[in-house]
Amino acid sequence: MGINQRFKQLPNYLILSMVIFTMAIKFQANSWNKKIIEQDVLSLYAYLPAAFIYKDVSLSFMNDGKENYYEKFWPIKQANGKYVIKTTMGTSLMYSPFFFIAHGIEKLSGKYANGYSATYKTLISFAALFYLVIGLIFTRKLLQKYFDPLITSVALLLIYLGTNLFYYTSFEPGMTHVYSFCLIAMFLFYCLKWYEKQKFTTSAILGVLIGLIVLIRPTNILIVLLFLLWEISRFYEIKLRLKLLLKNWPLIALMIITAFMIWIPQLLYWKMQTGSYFINSYNEQFYFNNFHIHKALLGFRKGWFIYTPVMFFAVVGVFFMKKKIKAIRTAYYFFLPALIYVTYSWWCWWYGGSYGARTMIDIYAVMSLPLAALISYFIYKKRITKILTYFAVSLFVVHNIFQTYQYLKNAIHYDSMTKEAYFDSFLRINPSEDFESLLVTPDYERAVQGLPEQRVKPEPLLDCSEKDFSYVNVNMYGKNKDFYIVSDVMVKDSLPDLEGKILIIPDSENPFNEDVDLRIGLFSNHVKQWMIEYPLLEITQNSSEEFRTDFVIPFSQYNAPNLKIFISNFSYEPIYGERIELIIHDLEGHYENNVY
């Protein structure tokens, strides 16, 4: 029995197994309705509750003062006073069948169908699984055009469990990526069908898919390059392709028309709210002369090849596309550089808080072909090569699942990773005590202006000499019911009493309340020996822009080598600060480590 017969059903069984595994993980983590309609998803989802619950896509109800609508919608207020939902409505269209099911369930049960209950969130989780299955099925169909069932199965395993597609299906299913993955997988399959036989139905399907793909993420319009260049491997074939397209111009026109029809509701919405059919609803931009490809691929903040290393081998696999798949290679030579260049010319090239390079998930079906080509090259070599290949595949899967749990446990930070932080967390599920001190938070305000996101070390506002211990930090973030550590140092010898001073500038939109105070203490073996507290409420009460105080640390009176300075927060809301600066005079050289 040949390999095609022995493994004929393996890809189908594998897809089923991966879906069951994902559902088991979601049940184990109780993540069916957690972290669903939050952050970016508020905008992606907003069209549905606005249209079908509030009955007003203009969002004019946001001015009625009845509730805090900003917890549900993240619109941009225009100069004309009207609101515009920040994202396009493509993801809402993909959610919509599941939204209507949830809405019907809530109505039939007699509950208040508000669009944000656990039922709606759970159905979005099912939506992600549904589109994942479709995406994997079409990726399987695509792969089996060129590879046997065994290679197809290994490639499918790596594309899902070896990448962050697993995380965004399992734990943040409301984000756009699994939906784009599904649509692009379908698009590639129908591209193949169209070049096999140019038909009306296939052309219409391609038009709908292009419209949806671009409506979810406009930059994904670059996938049209794959359609235009598919199976062009020689220069003279360009002329033949042009003849084919011109010969079938009515079908090409049909694709364009159907794609445009998908966009009509979006264009009418923008026209209604702004007076223009085309707008930049983000009010943010690309910097094409200031791209960040090296950081995006190999940087530790969000490097594609760092956090999803299997994709490095997928890119290498382009050069291993031989025989009947060789003709596709030219399309990759143009598409991949173009997509990477445009994607990472965006002002926020790391794309905010995320696990790895989330924007690249969209093209994982595209990358499945070169990945399969590389697997095929090695898996049918000598026995030792085959064993090493299977070992590498297993390692990629285990590595990705382990990193996923690191991210969930905060051992991988959502936007501030560095090389030092990455290796500090290496093989750790939970972050170390030193982890936060190794992070470097990007400066969003600089990045949106096209400047490097690395924070420029601020000039001290407090006077300090070379003999002083000094600490400066900007953008403080303290969780609710927690302590924000300003400094934790271990003094290595006895000292006289030392003077210090601290400056705290609060975030004007998040002033401190009566449950927040500054604490300076001396500890010995974690036992408090001395403590002084300064309530920070006076910043709000006095409308002050800053909090300054001098203090004396009585080292001579206590045998307590551990000096801790922290802000305690026992309120129910996180606290933010624009800047903290600390000076302790004559401490330089007398401490062993500066933890924070």
Image (cartoon, rainbow, N blue to C red):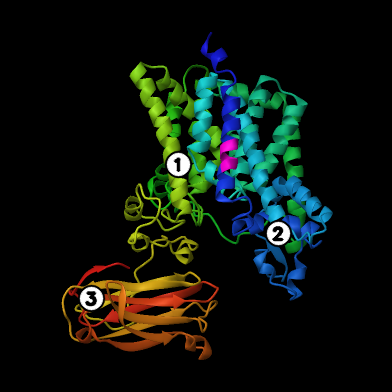
Q: Quadrant of residue 56?
A: bottom right
Q: Is 319 colored magenta in this rendering?
A: no
Question: Which residue is tagged 1?
Answer: 400
Characterize the local packing of mark 1: few (<14), some (14-19) or many (20 or more) Cα atoms within 10 angstroms. Answer: many
Q: Which sits earlier in the primary sequence, circle 1 or circle 3?
A: 1
Q: Is residue 178 visible?
A: yes
Disc 3 marks a residue whose amino acid type is: Pro
Q: Residue at x 47, y 60 (%)?
A: 450
Residue 594 or 48: which is nearer the viewer? Answer: 594
Question: Which residue is tagged 2?
Answer: 116
Residue 465 vs residue 382: left or right? left
Question: Which residue is tagged 3?
Answer: 561
**Label 2 SS:** loop
CA–CA distance between discs 1 and 3?
A: 42 Å
Disc 1 marks a residue whose amino acid type is: Asn
Characterize the local packing of mark 2: few (<14), some (14-19) or many (20 or more) Cα atoms within 10 angstroms. Answer: few
Residue 172 or 190: which is nearer the viewer? Answer: 172
